[in-house]
Image (cartoon, rainbow, N blue to C red):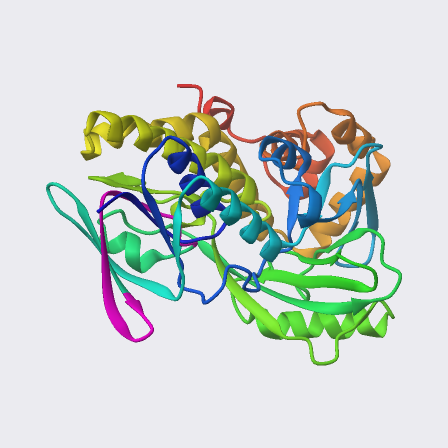
C-alpha cells in the first residue's frame, strides 16, 4: 500500500508527487495516457513569476515573450510591451515529462495507460479503481490526490460537486510565416464571449486556438482560414485538439483522505483559461497539507480542510474578481469592445496599466478592477465600478 496515490500525471500531479516523495512518502502517479508527452490543448504560455517559482527553464522553454498584439472585432490593434520578458512559451509535452522526471528522481512510481474509474474512501485507506489495457486494476493508499484536469464525474462521485461553469478550448499546430509576437483576437465572429490566439513556438511554427462555449472546432477552422488568407499561417492538415476548462472552483476541494488540485479543482484563471501556475500553487498546498496529515495519521475531512482555507487565502480573491470580469466581458457587444479599445489607445489607460507594478501576466484581478474602474471605459461598458465587496474578497 502506498502513502499517496496521485491521479493524473500532468504538471499538477507530478508537482504533488515530487513534493510528497521528497518528504519521504511512497507515491504512485496514475496516468490514463500511454506516454507522458501526449499532445496537450494548451497555448503553453506561462508567466515569468510562474517560471521562476517552479524553475521552468532550459529545454522546455521555446521562447521568451515581452510583447503581444491584441486585435478588436473590427481590427483595431493594441500592442502590449515591456522591456523585460513577461512570459515564456513552453513545450507543454516537454514540461509534463520534465516535472515527471523530477518526481521520479525523488522516488515516485508512474503507471501509464491507467484510467481511473472511481475512488472509494474507507475508514483506513482509499482504493483507486482503474482500467489498464482492458483489465481492472486497483491501488490502495492512505490518501489520494485528484489531479486529472477537468473531471466532473469523478469529483461528483466523491461528493465534491462540479465546477459551476466551464468552456471548451480548441487548438492546432500550424506553419507560421515570420511571426514573432503573440497575437490575441476578440470578436463574436472569432470566439463569442472569449478570444482566439496565435502563439509562435519554434521557427515557422505556431499554435492557433480559441475558447468557446459552443462549436469551438467550427470557430477555429474559420479563424485559421482567415489567418491563412492574411498570409500569417499555413494550416493544411492541421489536427485540432480539444479540452474542457473550468472557470469556477469546485464547491469543495477536500473530503476524507482526498484532496483535489489544479484544473480538477477549478484552479484556473477565469480571464484566460490558463491553469499551469495556479495549478502548481495548489499542488504545493495540497502536498504540504497531506504531508503534515500523513505524519500524524490524521486524514479526516476536518484534518484536511486547511488546504481549502490556504488556497482561498492565496487565490480566492483573484479567482472571484477574474470570474466577475469574465462574465462582464461575455455580455459585451463587438461595438463596445471596439470603443473600449479606442479609449485604451487614446486616454492613457494603456500606459497606466503597463506602468502599474501590481498588474502582471500571472495576476489579472487588479488589471480587471483598474480597467473597469476607469471612468471612460466604465461608461462604454455600461457598468458601474466593480462592487466594493470584490476588493475585500480573500481578506478574511
Left or right side of 227 for 245: left
Q: Position of residue 318 (x, y in %)?
A: 52, 33
Tell me: residue 229, above or below residue 377: below
Residues 370 and 296: in front is 296
Outermost residue, left direction?
123
Q: Position of residue 80 (x, y in %)?
A: 80, 40
Confirm whether residue 71 shows in the render.
no
Tell me: residue 348, above or below residue 236: above
Left or right side of 173 for 218: left
Quadrant hosting residue 346: top right
* Type of secondary structure dominating the magenta stretch: strand
- At x 87% / y 65%, what residue is drawn? 177
Residues 101 and 272: in front is 101
Quadrant hosting residue 138: bottom left
Tell me: residue 9, above or below residue 302: below
Residues 34 and 24: in front is 24
Task: Give the total number of marks visible in the rendering.
Answer: 0
Confirm whether residue 290 shows in the render.
yes
Q: Position of residue 305 (x, y in %)?
A: 27, 30
- At x 38% / y 30%, what residue is drawn? 23
The answer to if 260 sits in the magenta stretch is no
Left or right side of 44 for 226: right
Outermost residue, top direction?
396
The answer to if 136 sits in the magenta stretch is yes
Q: Look at the image and tell me in which quarter the C terminus lies.
A: top left
The part of the chain drawn in magenta is 131-149
Amino acid at each position: 500500500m502506498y502513502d499517496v496515490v496521485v491521479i493524473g500525471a500532468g504538471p499538477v500531479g507530478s508537482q504533488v508527487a515530487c513534493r510528497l516523495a521528497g518528504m519521504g512518502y511512497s507515491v504512485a502517479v496514475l496516468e490514463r495516457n500511454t506516454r507522458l508527452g501526449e499532445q496537450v490543448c494548451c497555448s503553453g504560455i506561462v508567466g515569468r513569476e510562474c517560471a521562476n517559482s517552479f524553475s521552468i527553464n532550459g529545454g522546455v522553454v521555446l521562447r521568451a515573450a515581452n510583447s503581444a498584439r491584441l486585435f478588436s472585432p473590427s481590427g483595431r490593434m493594441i500592442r502590449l510591451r515591456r522591456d523585460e520578458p513577461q512570459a515564456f512559451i513552453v513545450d507543454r509535452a516537454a514540461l509534463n515529462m520534465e516535472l515527471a522526471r523530477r518526481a521520479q528522481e525523488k522516488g515516485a512510481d508512474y503507471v501509464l495507460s491507467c484510467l481511473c474509474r472511481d475512488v472509494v474512501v474507507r475508514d483506513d485507506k482509499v482504493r483507486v479503481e482503474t482500467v489498464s489495457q482492458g483489465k481492472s486494476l486497483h491501488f490502495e493508499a492512505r490518501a489520494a490526490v485528484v489531479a486529472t484536469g477537468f473531471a466532473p464525474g469523478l469529483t461528483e462521485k466523491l461528493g465534491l460537486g462540479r465546477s459551476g461553469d466551464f468552456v471548451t478550448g480548441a487548438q492546432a499546430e500550424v506553419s507560421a510565416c515570420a511571426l514573432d509576437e503573440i497575437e490575441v483576437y476578440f470578436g463574436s465572429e472569432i470566439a463569442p464571449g472569449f478570444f482566439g490566439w496565435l502563439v509562435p513556438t519554434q521557427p515557422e511554427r505556431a499554435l492557433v486556438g480559441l475558447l468557446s462555449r459552443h462549436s469551438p472546432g467550427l470557430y477555429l477552422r474559420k479563424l485559421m482560414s482567415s489567418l491563412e488568407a492574411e498570409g500569417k499561417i499555413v494550416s493544411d492538415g492541421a489536427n485540432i485538439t480539444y479540452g474542457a476548462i473550468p472557470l469556477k472552483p469546485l464547491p469543495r476541494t477536500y473530503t476524507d483522505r482526498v484532496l483535489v488540485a489544479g484544473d480538477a479543482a477549478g484552479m484556473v484563471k477565469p480571464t484566460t483559461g490558463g491553469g499551469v501556475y495556479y495549478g502548481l500553487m495548489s499542488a504545493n498546498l495540497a502536498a504540504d497539507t497531506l504531508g503534515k496529515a500523513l505524519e500524524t495519521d490524521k486524514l479526516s475531512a476536518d484534518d484536511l480542510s486547511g488546504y481549502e482555507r490556504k488556497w482561498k487565502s492565496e487565490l480566492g480573491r483573484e479567482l472571484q474578481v477574474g470570474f466577475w470580469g469574465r462574465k462582464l466581458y461575455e455580455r459585451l457587444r463587438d461595438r463596445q469592445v471596439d470603443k473600449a479599445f479606442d479609449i485604451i489607445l487614446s486616454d492613457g489607460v494603456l500606459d497606466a496599466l503597463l506602468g502599474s507594478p501590481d498588474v502582471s501576466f500571472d495576476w489579472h484581478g487588479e488589471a480587471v478592477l483598474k480597467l473597469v474602474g476607469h471612468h471612460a471605459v466604465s461608461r462604454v461598458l455600461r457598468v458601474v465600478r466593480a462592487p466594493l465587496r470584490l476588493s475585500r474578497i480573500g481578506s478574511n
